Amino acid sequence: MVKVVFRSIPWVIPNYANRCFSKSFTTRKTVETAKQIRSLVDEGKIKEAVEFYESQGKKSDYRTLYESLHKLQSDDSKEVLKQLNNADNTEDSDIFNTNIFFSDSVEQAKEIYDKIEEDKKDPNTYDALIAVYLKCENNEDAYKTLEQAIKSEVKVKQKTIKRIIDAFVEDNDIKEAEKVLRLCASYCIEPGTTIYNVVLGGIIKTGDHESAKRLFELMGPDKNKDTFLIMLKNHLQREDQKSVDALLKEFLTETDVKDPLSSVIEAYVEQSKHESVKALLETVEEKYGIKVQEKHKNLVQIQNT
């Protein structure tokens, strides 16, 4: 086994607070540095990769080094990763967060997580731990970690919330996905339209159309084009013409979506409602005040071919 000797312990965790970073590094330089680290690790030149990393003096390269070593999965790279994970004389949360994110088990992630002082834990810390829980299919603990972060007044990232909801929806556990939304609502956290759309799509897959309608209404002005199209396709599939008419009225006349009629045509054709879309084009100007253009007619013809 190759033993890497470092100038100080722990070699690759320098005290960044005392370093003076040059702001003259360009984006190109950063990309070249990351590329060189990856190249050395891929070639199995672990010691050289570490020395090159240290010579750059940029903590942003730490993630590149760690990720490359983790991907290699050789005995030497695993030994270096072990040294990284055991290092505990730094207060830099970015380093710990990287170590957590690439952990191979919940136990390893928790061990690193517990080293971080509470006031040093930031949104990325919780995001990293939650990512590990979800990777290990431990959705319940991912939710508990989210709850802990929110109660600790950490400004949780939307992508973190979405990860958990995606996991619950993928498992058809809509009640748990809705529980995440309720948690956010109780602390006045706005999950965002994208997350609502994920839950909406999940509810529809379970066949609970009434709950889908309720969530659609609750979203109010937060609905976007995708929200309307998710519901429109559902109504078309169920042949619920009354709901289709109500939705079209709102979507075509009360939103600022650019060219909503084209999106509607595509939804109709996707659901194989070819005759219905032709009938819609014949009445859309009278009903909704939208003039049918040549591109709309062409879209129907193209979709039908």
Image (cartoon, grey):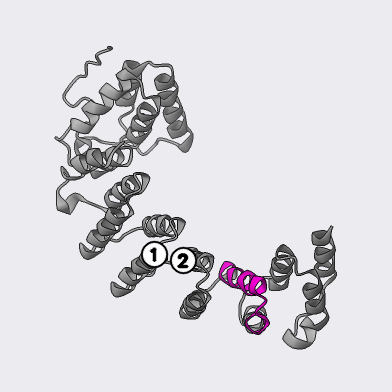
Q: Picture coordinates of residue 66 (x, y %)? A: 33, 31
Instruction: Estimate how packed mark 2 is, as few (under 14), some (14 to 19) or many (20 or more) residues with alpha carbons within 10 Å.
Output: many
Secondary structure of the residue carrying numbered label 2? helix
Q: Confirm whether the magenta stretch covers residue 103.
A: no
> Disc 1 residue type?
Ala
Instruction: Tell me if 298 is positioned left or right of 156 in this view.
Output: right
Q: Residue furthest bottom?
A: 286
Instruction: Estimate how packed mark 1 is, as few (under 14), some (14 to 19) or many (20 or more) residues with alpha carbons within 10 Å.
Output: many
Nearest the eye: 275 or 102: 275
Residue under the point 52% across and 78% down: 213
Nearest the eye: 28 or 97: 97
Residue under the point 34% across and 44% down: 136
Residue 13 quadrant: top left
Secondary structure of the residue carrying numbered label 1? helix
Position above or below: 225 against 84: below
Q: Which residues are magenta?
A: 226-245
Circle 2/circle 1 CB separation < 8 Å: yes
